[in-house]
Image (cartoon, rainbow, N blue to C red):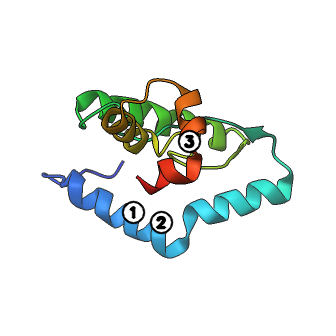
């Protein structure tokens, strides 16, 4: 069994691995192969990272769990489409607009007009 070096720089190792994955387009290759095989799709809805306020350790934990679940599914023959934040990415902005305009119900936005709401 090979021995480990006396000191490991995990941050540097991560950078090296991420550079290799980027160069080899690892995730794109995994997706392409999965689609070619006709793997069953695994759907995992992931919201924006900080929709509920400033980042904190809870976001790191949730992100780690989400990453682990989707990687596990991919390694077990599922097709995993990774689209982080697709479901409510605009939520923090909409929340601020609602506060500014004192909007509390969807009907108020529709009455105002979505184009005017978006222009705010």
Instruction: Name the residue located 44 percent from the left edge and 24 percent from the top edge.
Output: 104
Instruction: Name the residue located 55 percent from the left edge and 70 percent from the top edge.
Output: 25
- Would you place residue 89 above or below residue 65 in this image? below
State the residue in front, 105 or 46. Answer: 105
Q: Give how far across and how far down residue 99 sits, in percent.
A: 33, 33
Which label is found at residue 71?
Answer: 3
Q: Is residue 120 left or right of residue 106?
A: left
C-beta proximity under 8 Å, tags 3 and 1: no
Secondary structure of the residue carrying tag 2 is helix
Residue at label 2?
A: 21
Name the N-terminal-most of marks 3 and 1: 1
Secondary structure of the residue carrying tag 1 is helix
Instruction: Name the residue located 51 percent from the left edge and 52 percent from the top edge.
Output: 116
| Residue furthest to the front | 111
How crowded pointer 1 is (Cα within 10 Å; few <14, some 14-19, many 20+) is rated as: few
Q: Quadrant of residue 41?
A: top right
State the residue in front, 51 or 59. Answer: 51
Residue at label 1?
A: 18
Q: Quadrant of residue 33?
A: bottom right
Mark 3 and mark 2: span between their CA atoms? 14 Å
How crowded pointer 3 is (Cα within 10 Å; few <14, some 14-19, many 20+) is rated as: few
Secondary structure of the residue carrying tag 3 is helix
Q: Give how far across and how far down residue 26 sits, in percent.
A: 56, 64
C-beta proximity under 8 Å, tags 3 and 2: no
Mark 2 and mark 1: span between their CA atoms? 5 Å
C-beta proximity under 8 Å, tags 2 and 1: yes
- Would you place residue 62 above or below residue 92 in this image? above
| Residue furthest to the left | 6
- Would you place residue 24 above or below residue 83 in this image? below
Q: Is residue 86 left or right of residue 2?
A: right
């Amino acid at each position: 069994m090979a021995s480990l070096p006396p000191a490991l720089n995990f941050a540097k190792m991560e950078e090296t691995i991420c550079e290799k994955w980027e160069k080899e387009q690892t995730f794109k290759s995994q997706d392409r192969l999965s689609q070619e095989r006709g793997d069953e799709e695994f759907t995992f809805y992931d919201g924006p990272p900080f929709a509920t306020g400033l980042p904190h350790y809870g976001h790191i934990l949730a992100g780690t769990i989400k990453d682990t679940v989707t990687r596990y599914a991919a390694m077990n023959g599922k097709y995993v489409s990774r689209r982080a934040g697709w479901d409510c990415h605009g939520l923090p902005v909409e929340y601020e607009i609602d506060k500014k305009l004192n909007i509390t119900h969807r009907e108020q936005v529709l009455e105002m007009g979505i184009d005017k709401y978006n222009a705010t």
